[in-house]
Image (spheres, grey):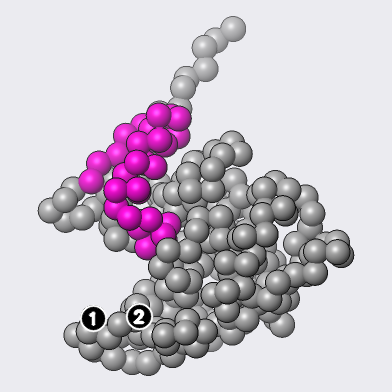
Amino acid sequence: MLLALTRDRSGRAWRLADTCAACAAATSNTAVVPDTLSGSLRQQASPGPPPPARRSHAGVQERERVREMLTYLGTALPRFTSPAARLLALQCALRADTRAHVRLPAGLLRGMRLRQNREVWLELAHAGWLELPDVRTLPWQVRLLDATVLDQAPGRRTRCRAADWALRPVPLVLPATAPALRLTALVLAAHTGARPEHSTDMDILTRLCGHSPQQTGELLDRLVTTRTLRAWHHNRETDAVSWQLPQPQARTPT
């Protein structure tokens, strides 16, 4: 049995239900909730300090939190939600308090180039995901309408660190550039481990980025051009996308 998320025709109501794989595939506007989100909810039932091995690796927990939230937003938001809206939704979801309220400092919005982009806010409001903020007051205060955000684990402080990491996702940090390229780099960074070569499915990349496979390939080519990636490859038989990071340059002795 699988946990499936189904959206009604208006796009304003969602329903979670256990179903088989065949029924989920045959039902329109339905997506299977990935195991990563279920795993995070299971951790909430037994809170406690993370194991020492995880504390010793800076950025590992932040990467996991961002990957889980990107996976959830890939099912909760409409299929072709813009990259800028997805980046904003990620920051709001990770920074939300226990009442689904978010305070967004002006510096954060300026850094993300979203303060004057009203279309992004309208896009998420039209999807029924948040209420439009009062732009006359600073910092902006937003109320999320997605009740699932309230069930997040771990605590808010850990999630805020993950939100900060998402702004500079080591090792794929990009300068201020187009949201589509930043979101692609963020998704790759969230799926980058300690091995020299990293991979995930093309379907995952397209779902989390809201692109078609062709658009995703073009963005990966641009990441190679900017030397953010060393190379990438799409295995069409397995649908796996693999990528390599640039090798660190050795320092020349003075």
Q: Nearer the viewer, residue 189 or 7?
A: 7
Inspect this view and state whether residue 196 appears. no
Where is residue 91 drawn, in percent x and y? 63, 62
Q: Nearer the viewer, residue 60 or 173?
A: 173
Residue type, mark 2 in image: Asn
Instruction: Tell me if residue 50 is in the magenta stretch.
Output: no
Q: Which residues are magenta?
A: 206-234
Q: Could you say which quadrant of the image residue 137 lies in?
A: bottom right
Determine whether 146 is above or below 229 in the image: below
Q: Residue at x 31, y 44 (%)?
A: 217
Residue type, mark 1 in image: Ala
Disc number for residue 25: 1
Q: Nearer the viewer, residue 184 or 252?
A: 184
Disc number for residue 29: 2
Inspect this view and state whether residue 31 appears. yes
Where is residue 127 drawn, in percent x and y? 54, 75
Q: Residue at x 48, y 63 (%)?
A: 81
